[in-house]
Image: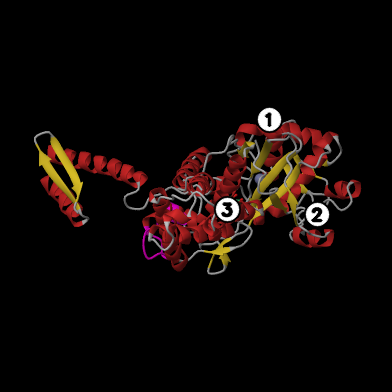
Amino acid sequence: MIHSEYGPLMVHNSLTRQKEVFTPLVEGQVGMYVCGPTVYKSAHIGNARTFVSFDIIYRYLLHLGYRVRYVRNITDVGHLTDDGDQGEDKLLKQAIEEKKQPMEIVQMATLDFHDVMKSLNALPPSIEPTATGHIIEQIRMVSQILERGYAYEVNGSIYFDTQKYIKDHPNQYGALSGKKTDDLLEETRDLNNQSDKKHPTDFALWISAPKEHLMQWESPWGMGYPGWHLECSAMSTKYLGKTFDIHGGGLDLLFPHHENEIAQNVGCCGTNPVRYWIHTNMLTVNGTKMSKSLNNSVSPAELFTGEGSIMSKAFNPMIVRFLMLQSHYRSTFDLSDDALLAAEKGYNRLMQGLKTLEQIQATGTGQTEHDDRITNGIESIYGHLNDDFSTPQALASIFDLITMINSLNDGHISSAEVNTNSLEELRKVLAAIIHDVFGLIDVTAGASGSGQSLDAVMELVLELRQQARADRNFATADLIRAKLTEAGITIKDGKDGSSWSVQS
Ligand code: AMP
Ligand code: ZN
């Protein structure tokens, strides 16, 4: 059953630049494709912001009761250094720099990406296809585009014919990015005039590879590799169909990536692939977009360990996630130590509020102004989330309810003035929104989750200390004990091994 008690879900569609009522193609089901990471370097916290935003959208759709097929790809070939079709393959360049096989780079960056997503408690997508795993599908799509006359071959490379596309589909090319044909011409002008393209706005679907190129596949046009935009058209079509509900990515992908994806799909299949385009805005540092290619990247690991230059201390991934929830996905947000410190306070207040809510009692049986406040509060949380997933406003409504919870706890509101059923409903809704939709886990002191992780860490530390003692490395064993004592943890060595306790 889809929740519709609190009104329809409105989604901002980048294609129409308007909020629209979300109605999926098939009732009760949603197909969602999100452009995944290019795995040539570890993801930075800006990339993570985009993927956490889509995680929240995914979680909210599930919460509403939709069956969602969420496809997020891994780009492991074809993304060139100029984000178009000039330059080198980002991955190959990195592999040569590090003297590794391209697939070693892919493996390292993919594992790292999964670790980061797990730390931030993002759910895995339903399917995570790789570009190199779908070469056959991409070759097939190029053939279909060629057959329909929207592409041409030059020296073993295949280019999309934008001029024919523009002629046959007036006002389509540039509709998503809002670019006029003249601007496109200016932006894509090939200064060196070295291109084989018939027209500067044409783009590569398949690129002929020189012999020494490490990543290449056989195709009807000789050895080569796919253009970057092609993988997303081929994989979204394969797993979600020729037309599907939601396509997402960062705003920087509007042009050329997403504009060209639409052209490829229309060129291949005659259908506009996406019903709702959703784009996240950029995470910035001192107002500049965080980017793998500008030297201003902060890695999630730096935030979590406090080793980055802009942070005064380590921040738990849940605080970073909370910070992301505090801004709307379509607004930019600037990463700073102050913002993280404020998020930490907000997060602690939220978790404390939830704990208090678990403990307080209500004995009322009537309907008072406090019950109305609960009902209105719940309605406004859903109202904000239904308004293009407005997490900052939903959080504000939750904090208003937490103020009330605290009043009930400290006796400013008596338990008889709140209806038992309203309090029960509030417990249910806040737990679902905060844990299931926002994906926030309680890691504050005394929370069961944090206790479990401390248990696991201490088990490991004691094992390492035991190993040091077995190796007669008593200096290390003593150092571990001394440092733990400093941190407020006492170790006791007994006949059956060591045990630990937190000093009170
Ligand atoms: P990439 O790994 O460069 O292909 O990027 C993966 C995703 O992260 C894409 O959806 C980008 O649009 C997004 N992205 C890149 N930089 C940022 C940033 N600074 N803030 C938010 N999203 C970003
Ligand atoms: Zn893509």
- Using the numbered discs, state the Cα–Cα distance from disc 1 to disc 2 in whole angstroms: 30 Å
Q: Is residue 133 left or right of residue 458?
A: right
Whether residue 387 is situated above or below residue 147 in the rendered picture: below
Decide if residue 349 is in sight here.
yes
Relative side of 85 to 127, left or right: right
Q: Which residue is mark 2?
A: 175
Q: The magenta stretch spans which residues?
A: 306-320
Residue under label 1: 136
Q: Secondary structure beneath disc 3?
A: helix
Determine the secondary structure under disc 2. Answer: loop
Depth check, mark 3 against mark 1: the one in front is 3
The tag earlier along the polypeptide, 3 or 2, is 2
Quarter assignment of residue 372: bottom right
Placement of the C terminus among the 4 image quadrants: bottom left
Residue beneath label 3, please?
375
Q: Check whether the beta carbons of the residues at disc 1 and disc 2 lie within 8 A of each other.
A: no
Report the amino acid beneath label 1.
Ile
Residue 176 in percent (x, y) is at: 77, 53
| Classed neighbour count for the residue bearing mark 3: other residues with Cα under 10 Å, few (<14), some (14–19), many (≥20) | some
Q: For the residues carrying marks 1 and 2, which lies nearer the camera in this image?
A: 2
Q: Residues within 10 Å of mark 2 (few under 14, many from 20)?
A: some
Of the 4 image quadrants, the one containing the N terminus is top right
Q: Which residue is rendered at x = 11% and y = 41% of the image?
A: 493
Q: Tell me, yes or no, whether the highlighted magenta stretch contains residue 359.
A: no
User: Which label was assigned to residue 345?
Assistant: none
**Dot 1: element:** helix
In this figure, which colouring scheme has been used for the structure? Answer: secondary structure
Instruction: Give how far across and how far down residue 257 sits, in percent.
Output: 70, 50
Vertical placement of residue 271 versus 171, above or below: above
